[in-house]
Amino acid sequence: MTPSAPVALPDLAIERVLSVPVKPAEAPPRIAFTVRGEIAAKGSLRARPWRTKDGSRSGISMVQSSSKAKSSQALVADRLSAVMDEGHLRAIEGPVSVSMTLYRRKPKSYPKRKASWPITKPDIDKQARLVLDALSGIAFADDAQVVRLVAEKCWGEPGVDVLVESWRQL
């Protein structure tokens, strides 16, 4: 074996690393608020056919089955708008997580010492839909952005506690 000739190494460019101050991680956007008052169920839309008296025109109009839904939705939307104005908050972009606790007054006929749950109407999914529709366009652009939804019904002073957060799965 003959000694091998030294291998010439290519000139390596040495980069100077600069220390750049790192910005502290920002907390993901979140909006929390409480609304006190009875939260109605969104209900279903019902089709009502109509026709003019002379029969020249007809159509179908969609009518909300719950008469209280409109005022409840406005109550939630107004409170959310006030909270966002006070905190100088903007609508959340991207995926959103919504958690809500809906409170109902416990009827006097229910047992006082035994645990009980509000398993009566209105349905939690219809109440959640009303709250989501109220949030849509204010807390986030569209309720299609909601990727996580947690809803709970409890006894207490009628109303709803809502937490809207940017959903970042790490």
Image: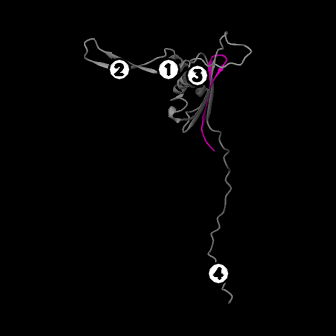
Q: Residues within 10 Å of mark 3 (few under 14, many from 20)?
A: some
CA separation in Å, label 4 and label 2: 86 Å
- Of residue 154 and residue 10, the one placed in the foreground of this image is 154
Mark 3 / mark 2, whichever is N-terminal: 2
Mark 4 / mark 2, whichever is N-terminal: 4
Q: Residues within 10 Å of mark 1 (few under 14, many from 20)?
A: some
Span shown in magenta: 152-170
- Asked whether disc 2 touches disc 1, contact meaning CB atoms under 8 Å apart, the reply is no
Q: Which residue is mark 1?
A: 43
CA separation in Å, label 3 and label 1: 22 Å
Type of the residue with mark 2: Ile
Question: Quick check: is 162 in the magenta stretch?
Answer: yes
Residue 33 image offset from top left, x and y in percent: 63, 25
Q: Secondary structure at mark 4?
A: loop
Q: Secondary structure at mark 3?
A: helix
Report the mark closest to the observer, 3 or 1.
Answer: 1
Report the mark closest to the observer, 3 or 2.
Answer: 2
- Overall secondary structure of the magenta stretch? strand
